[in-house]
Image: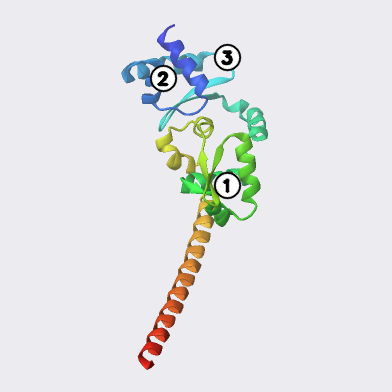
Amino acid sequence: MTDKKKIEAVLFAVGKEISTERLASLSSLEVKEVKKVMKSLIAEYNDRDHALKIESRDNGWKLTVRDEFVPLVSNIVTSTEIEKPLMDTLAVIAWKYPIVQSEIIKLRGSGAYEHMSNLVQQGFVAKEKFGRTYKVKLTQKFFEYFDLPSEEAKEAFLKLVPAEVLEEAEAVEKEHDEVERLIELEEKEKVGKSEIEKAMKEVKN
């Protein structure tokens, strides 16, 4: 198998943008060899009369469809994408990961129970018992689906998510934390008053 065919196969299999370094690793080639082959491949694809092209992007390369075929494939992709409410809940899970189920419900509301059930069925998250709640984990399918190495998952995945989703969740978290802080202060005050009353009784006796 030639270097060109190996790289072409990797680009097809990945299906998403991939860095030169990652492409080199998967193709068992040197970075400089990959760069040389990519220039040749791009020229070949530009000369071919078919629907595909190879793009050079800021963070790497991508095998994709030519512009005139985008409307066609967009309809297909949209019909198979994760629904927006599920994506938003998945975004919160990735943002706060590792996270427990009770925290997700706090940030996303009771509807997140159904979201997580669907995400578990689809294989993007897994749940395991953790005290009185569940620990929610991102699965290997999550990392593979979004084409992300585990250590970069949170930052890279969240770039796909509308900022308002995380801003809303963060606002809810701050509000919840403030309520918990006030409750804690109130409890401390009660304890303090109780101890003072107890001390006064002891002094009187």
Dot label at residue 88 = 1
Which residue sits at x=63%, y=45%?
A: 115
Which residue sits at x=61%, y=26%?
A: 68
Disc nearer the start of the sequence (2/1): 2
Q: Amino acid at mark 1?
A: Asp
Give the Cα distance between marks 2 and 3: 28 Å
**Could you say which quadrant of the image residue 107 lies in?**
bottom right
Q: Is residue 141 above or below residue 174?
A: above
Residue nearest the observer in this picture, 42 or 152: 152
Disc nearer the start of the sequence (3/1): 3
Helix, strand or loop for disc 3: loop
Q: Is residue 35 above or below residue 139?
A: above
The image shows residue 22 at horizontal and vertical percentages of: 39, 25
Helix, strand or loop for disc 1: helix
Tell me the residue that label 2 is attached to.
26
Dot label at residue 49 = 3
Q: Amino acid at mark 2?
A: Leu
The image shows residue 29 at horizontal and vertical percentages of: 35, 15
- In the image, taking residue 140 as reference, residue 59 lies left or right, namely left
